[in-house]
Image: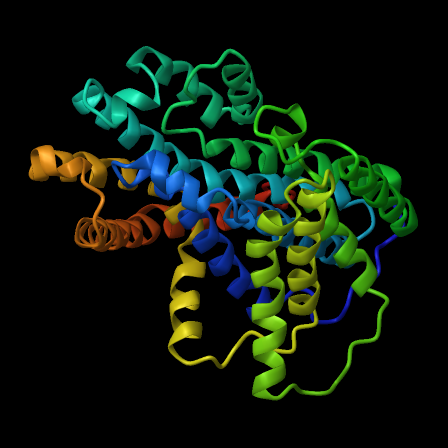
């Protein structure tokens, strides 16, 4: 295999990319507010016209960039004949990085359904009998396919529905290393990425009931394309003043949120919205700390970004249990949509998400560290000394 060309600093983390992780999970949390409030229909009417759901696509573009950058760097540094070992180590790290935390959230969801499955709002998210197949789809990484089948059958997708995006990412993590080994060319990878992006531009990827919505890998390939392009592009050494940095940070994100409401009748609206997120990833890829130094905003995003995966895993269950608790505490008044009621529910939800911190510290971090240790052991051959 021809060794890929990678920048000298490509093995290090880029703070701006990590900040975008925090942005993406916040957008997703807003998109899923109907799971939080008892007046879900009214909440959905407020949230759905906007592009908060494109936080997932932003995360896809980030993942495509980060994973392609990491793999190409490792392959470029590998000794001849060690490419397959590099890929094996990558897959092992991904297993330990993702599955332990995902399994814990699945178990907690199954326990909640067993305890409260007959009560609203849990009862509206799928019958208890559906959670066995749903858990299997989540943990075996075919939730996107299972979810599409459930939608077509007009059945609820359960509180594990958000695992569809994790399944799609895992499928991509299996595919991308194989592509890197077999295509054996930066140019071929660029052509393939461009072809996938162009294909999805003409598919109806914005409709929940369309298959393209559930397999929309164009964001991931946008990330791969940014990685490949920026390997050869000269980066400006200039720094940006505060006004410029605010514009570069807020502008594309605001476009992601607002464009769907503006361009809704257009068939290409979803692809154009994704492109705005891609612009943010491209700006971040320059590693110029454009998105840093915004005081408490930066500190909050940095806190969220580290726990973004754990928050994503737990937030639907947390939202639903907060709504369940509110219904039990408020009684008949629970259905009354007021600012006071909304504020109480939102504040309780914020507190509930702090549960992500111990899950991050006790499960996700130790599993990641173990995965790195196991991966380092792959391909090492100990020398056996014959007894004299």
- The quarter of the rendered structure image containing the N terminus is top right
Q: Residue at x 62, y 44 (%)?
A: 90
Quarter residue 65 falls in = bottom right
* Image x and y of residue 68, in percent: 71, 51
Along the viewing direction, whichever of 353 and 74 lies nearer the viewer: 353
Along the viewing direction, whichever of 291 and 170 lies nearer the viewer: 291
Quarter residue 290 falls in = bottom right
- Reply above or below: 309 against 232: above
- The quarter of the rendered structure image containing the C terminus is top right
Q: Residue at x 60, y 38 (%)?
A: 169
* Image x and y of residue 305, in percent: 45, 60
Residue 225 lies left or right of residue 170; in this view the side is: right
Along the viewing direction, whichever of 135 and 93 lies nearer the viewer: 135
Residue 146 lies left or right of residue 265; in this view the side is: left
Does any portion of residue 174 appear in the rendered image? Answer: yes
Q: What is the total number of numbered labels drawn onto the structure image?
A: 0
Residue 43 lies left or right of residue 181; in this view the side is: left
- Reply above or below: 328 against 380: above
- Reply above or below: 145 against 301: above
Q: How is the image coloured?
A: rainbow
Residue 249 lies left or right of residue 86; in this view the side is: left
Q: Residue at x 71, y 64 (%)?
A: 282
Q: Residue at x 58, y 24 (%)?
A: 209
Does any portion of residue 86 appear in the rendered image? Answer: no
* Image x and y of residue 176, in percent: 72, 40
* Image x and y of residue 287, in percent: 65, 73
């Amino acid at each position: 295999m021809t060794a890929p060309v990678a920048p000298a600093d490509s093995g290090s983390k880029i703070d701006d990319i990590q900040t975008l992780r925090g942005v993406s999970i916040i957008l997703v949390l807003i998109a899923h507010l109907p799971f939080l409030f008892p007046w879900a229909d009214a909440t959905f009417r407020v949230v759905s016209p906007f592009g908060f759901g494109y936080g997932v696509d932003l995360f896809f573009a980030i993942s495509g960039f980060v994973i392609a950058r990491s793999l190409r760097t490792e392959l470029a540094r590998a000794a001849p004949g060690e490419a397959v070992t590099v890929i094996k180590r990558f897959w092992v790290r991904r297993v330990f990085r993702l599955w332990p935390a995902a399994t814990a959230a699945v178990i907690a969801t199954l326990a909640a359904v067993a305890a409260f499955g007959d009560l609203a709002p849990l009862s509206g998210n799928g019958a208890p009998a559906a959670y066995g197949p749903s858990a299997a789809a989540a943990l075996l990484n075919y939730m996107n396919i299972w979810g599409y089948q459930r939608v077509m059958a007009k059945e609820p997708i359960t509180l594990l529905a958000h695992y569809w995006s994790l399944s799609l990412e895992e499928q991509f993590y299996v595919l991308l290393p194989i592509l890197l080994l077999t295509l054996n060319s930066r140019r071929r990878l660029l052509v393939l990425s461009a072809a996938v992006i162009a294909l999805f531009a003409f598919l109806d990827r914005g409709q929940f009931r369309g298959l393209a919505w559930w397999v929309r890998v164009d964001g991931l390939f946008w990330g791969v394309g940014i990685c490949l392009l920026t390997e050869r592009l000269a980066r400006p050494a200039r720094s940006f003043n505060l006004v410029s940095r605010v514009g570069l940070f807020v502008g594309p994100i605001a476009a992601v949120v607002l464009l769907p409401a503006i361009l809704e009748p257009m068939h290409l609206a979803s692809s154009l919205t994704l492109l705005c997120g891609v612009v943010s990833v491209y700006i971040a890829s320059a590693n110029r700390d454009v998105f840093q130094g915004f005081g408490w905003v930066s500190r909050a995003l940095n806190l969220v970004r580290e726990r973004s995966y754990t928050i994503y895993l737990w937030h639907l269950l947390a939202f639903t249990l907060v709504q369940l608790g509110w219904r039990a505490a408020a009684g008949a008044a629970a259905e009354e949509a007021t600012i006071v009621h909304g504020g109480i529910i939102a504040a309780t939800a914020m507190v509930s998400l702090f549960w992500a911190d111990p899950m991050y510290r006790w499960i996700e971090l130790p599993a990641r560290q173990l995965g790195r240790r196991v991966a380092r052991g792959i391909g090492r051959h100990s020398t056996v000394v014959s007894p004299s």
